[in-house]
Image (tube, rainbow, N blue to C red):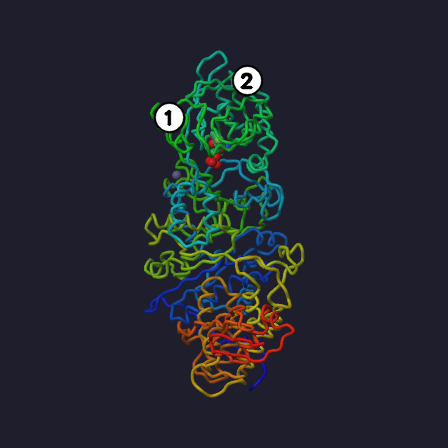
Amino acid sequence: MERNYDPISVEKKWQKHWEEVQAFRAEDKSDKPKFYPLIEFPYPSGAGLHVGHPRPYTAMDVVARKRRLEGYNVLFTMGWDAFGLPTEDYAIKNKIHPKIVTENNIKRFKEQLHSLGLSFDWSREVDTTDPNYYKWTQWIVLKLFEHGLAYKKTMTINWCPRCKVGLANEEVVQGCCERCDTEVVQKPKEQWMLKITDYAEKLLEGLDEVDFIERVKVQQRNWIGRSEGAEIDFELYSESGNPLSELKIFTSRPDTIYGTTYMVISPEHPLINEHADEIRNLSALEEYAENAAKKSDFERSEMNKDKTGVCIEGIYAKNPVSGAHMPVFVSDYVLMSYGTGAIMSVPAHDERDFEFAKKFDLPIIRVIKNDTPDGEFDAGEGGVLMNSPLIDGLSPDEAKRKMIEILEERGIGRQKVNYKLRDWVFSRQRYWGEPMPLVYCDVCGWQPVPESELPVLLPDVENYEPTDNGESPLAKMTDWINTTCPKCGGAARRETDTMPQWAGSSWYYLRYCDPHNDKVFADKALMDYWLPVDWYNGGMEHTTLHLLYSRFWHRFLYDIGVVSTKEPYMKRTSHGLILAPGGGKMSKSKGNVVSPDQYTTTVGADALRIFEMFIGDFEKPNPWNDDGVKGAKRYLDKVWQLQDMIVSGEGYLPELEGLMHRTIKKVSYDFENLKFNTAIAQLMTLLNEIRGVGKLTDDMLKTYLILLNPVAPHITEEIWELMNYGGEIRNQKWPAYDEAKTVESTFKLAISVGGKFKLAIELEDGISEAEAVERAKAEKKVAAALEGKEIKKIIYVEKKMVNFVV
Ligand code: ANZ
Ligand code: ZN
């Protein structure tokens, strides 16, 4: 061996070289098939990378490098999702412009990524805070506005009193702010909204066209929450029997209508005001509504075990099918934001209604006959209808269809589909985000800024603190705010809200196709060439946020003819988190964050990459462990030593030929199927076998190095050069295997003792007689039969049987 393995100098050398020759540049014109892998670009925080980041990055880098070796034109790149609150908070605390904070953070992240040897095409780097980028984010929002998909609305929003910011439902976890864990309160606020609900059906349908892992599809489907049922018009009457108005309800179970024993409306329901004159206990209802307003939807639904409510005195409702009269309640378990904000209560077959009826001593009428004993709750999913004259004897499914027919015929109800999905709150009253490209004119209302005036630049302000009433710091900048109306030329005011963090990341994969274009957000022909993204790996925590949002934007851009595919991502996979050593989430507050730097500067990036991929099942969380990285380094030391074991000869040594072919096959498959750990295990097995034999040919070493190259790119490149194999390993061809040679051939050996058959065992072809006999003797049954006896003779028929004569 010419010299010892020094990972640090080897890695520096190759990283510098790759940068100089732009080794991983994606070609916009190519005869090669294209491959577009994508990883979620990071938010460049002040803390730098932790060892969790390289896991998905290395995984997709492995696939990208393998595909290049297989002859693909690969677009693999990186960027920065750099707007956001942590940067702004840091800027406020340290009185540094968020732009400077962002620049510094990006610089740090970039150095760290470089030191990991990831094969990005850095010429395509994007930064969401760059005006040349957010110009197009604003452009897309203008298009959404033009198509009626952006609107302003006063609504109660989830408000984090600590961050002073409104939160999307997706950002509220167990009733608390996802970021700071402060309890979220409800606050009325004018907000820009994006009508993602218009796309609920398309987003559902699109899932059938893509190859996403099942748990991602399930989560998105549940989040969209399609529910088929009926809207039914009940009738409200005053106490004296005067008809008042309709009470529309949504139910997913119109088949249970005969089991309705009372009605519930949400405490915010407008009918309360409408019929204030008839209602005798108005103040009790108002008080109840006030208390309900303090609770989040989550507390009111998911956490609401002890049901509360107030009966509305002075009105009653009539069942339009059975004619029964029923009381009407308000209760906070009915949400104004779902369906019609009112329900028919069927306590026999709806658990929430059951709890409520028990508490308020209301009648419970079963309408589905099955094995559940009387008095016990029954979800009413099996069995047949009873106590329901028009639909008795039908199954719930048949009864649903029949009841909807009846309702529609009589004009008292209709089939209806509801979605859990809510519109997307698309504004923040904060500084460090894209300005909304809209102005308000007293005469013309909200007007889009003309495209020619984009980008609307984020102006410099003196301080970035949001105002206490929750307005953006931009609201203090009168010079910037005052402008003219693009429609009538009169005085107008700029929107001071900025976009939420999810804006820039909703389309970055499009910009990667053509990152420097200043005419359009990306050239159509280039997008047609590169899209869709072939494989997108990212965190499960983004399933109902970024992944859904970007699918929505993409589908909208498809509908207006800007992109040619309905879906942005063909395949979606997800990695498990790297946990802190010993388990538990890595977090700054717990002080257990492990930085990759301590490895890239000691044992090297290749060892780190090996361990990141070897740590365990890629899709499961795995705790970090220092010794593992050291073990990876020892493995690479042994790979280095292969240089000393070369013997002359072509092809693979016969005794290792099968294993070589099996290894090529397994590694090729595993790298494409998230089984990075077992691919590496196979490479380790092959290494041990080679060391056992004590020698290998150049062809074997070449194959070994190419297979290992995607995971450990530096050391394999270096050995390739030291061995004078010619060119660079990154330009070689991925090895092929011969299927016939991968078959591990074995034979069955029948074992008898004293002529009596004991058992048959499976042995590998080519095993020697001596070894076969030893293996036979080692079998428990055989050993027991031979116990205390003297072996007189051994009859061995090759590949067939052995008989111990005793
Ligand atoms: C009668 C009934 C009988 C119901 C039964 C369920 C079971 P999904 O499937 O999630 O769409 N509901 C309707 N609007 C509501 C609101 N604003 N707040 C709280 N609950 C509401 O749920 C639909 C069911 O949730 C509806 O069907 C209604 O209760 C309730 F055996 O009506 B059901
Ligand atoms: Zn105007």
Q: Quadrant of residue 513?
A: bottom left
Quadrant in the rendering for residue 593: bottom right
Q: Above or below — where is 377 with respect to 80?
A: above
Marks 1 and 2 sit apart, C-alpha to C-alpha, by: 29 Å
Q: Secondary structure under badge 1?
A: helix
Q: Secondary structure at mark 2?
A: loop
Number of residues whose C-alpha sits closer than 10 Å to that of mark 2, classed few (under 14), some (14–19) or many (20 or more): some
Where residue 340 appears, x then y in whole percent? 46, 30
Residue 760 seen anywhere in this rendered image of the structure = yes
Name the spot of residue 719 as percent of width and height, x first.
Answer: 51, 80
- Residue flagged by tag 1: what amino acid is it? Leu
Residue named by callout 1: 407
Which residue occupies the foreground of this view, 116 or 475? Answer: 116
Left or right of 565? Residue 640 is: right
Whether residue 336 is visible: no
| Residue bearing mark 2 | 313
The vertical placement of 379 against 110, above or below, is above
Front-lying residue, 154 or 52: 52
Measured as percent of width and height from the top left, residue 653 is found at 46, 82
Q: What percent of the width, then of the height, locates residue 336?
A: 50, 31
Name the residue located 62 percent from the left edge and 71 percent from the top edge.
630
Query: Looking at the image, is mark 1 or mark 2 earlier in the sequence?
Result: 2
Identified by mark 2, the residue type is Glu
| Residue at 37% from the left image edge and 61% from the top image edge | 530
> Given the current orientation, which residue lies at the most extreme bottom position?
648
Q: Left or right: 176 with respect to 499? A: right
What label sits on residue 586 in the rendered view?
A: none
